[in-house]
Amino acid sequence: MSNRFLRSAFATALALAAAAPTGASAQTLNMDMSWGIQAQAQNWAYGQAAANAAAMNYLRHMQRLRAMGYTGPSLPTGVTPQSLRQSINGMNDAWSSYNRAQSVNSQRLSNSVHDYVMQGIRGCTLVNRYGTPTYICP
């Protein structure tokens, strides 16, 4: 009787294992990045439209001045190699600051998860030895 019970239990376990979803089919990841590509294309188009509008405003302004009899040189646009360099440096500084902030936030999260695992799950005690946090585990 125990042999039949073991065969039945094994068959039941095998059937349940076969019916259970695998890790790959149980959780699919949404890897549709079309929204990001569309947003990037929209932002590029916005930047192009803004640059075109600025250039057209300058052109129309100069055409009006010429129509009114202005014969001098073209008016300065305000865009110089120095102003472009400052703009690029400002953008690089902003991205560096953003990346630093994300790195610090990631490290903070990693430290808190590590601390929770060590103290909450493993039951270790946090002590400060010579200025360095150390865990003493049972």
Image: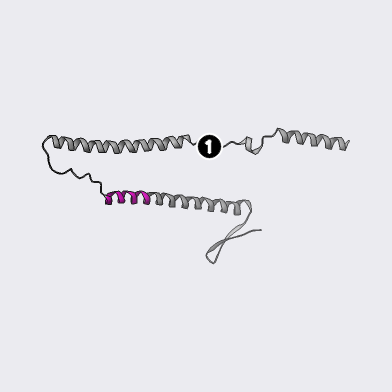
**138 above or below 5?**
below
Quick one: SS at disc 1?
Answer: loop
Query: Residue shown at 75%/33% (left/top)?
Result: 15
Q: Residue furthest left?
A: 69
Image spot of residue 61 (x, y percent): 19, 37
Image spot of residue 42 (x, y percent): 39, 35
Query: Residue shown at 53%/37% (left/top)?
Result: 31
**111 above or below 77?**
below
- Quadrant of the snapshot with the N terminus: top right
Q: Magenta segment: does it hold 78?
A: no
Disc tally is: 1
Task: Give the extent of the magenta segment.
Answer: 81-92
Side (left or right) of 128 relative to 100 = right
Which residue is labeled 1 in the image? Answer: 31
Instruction: Tell me the quarter of the picture where residue 29 sits.
Output: top right
Side (left or right) of 29 relative to 81 = right
Image spot of residue 85 (x, y percent): 31, 51
**38 above or below 110?**
above
Side (left or right) of 57 relative to 138 = left
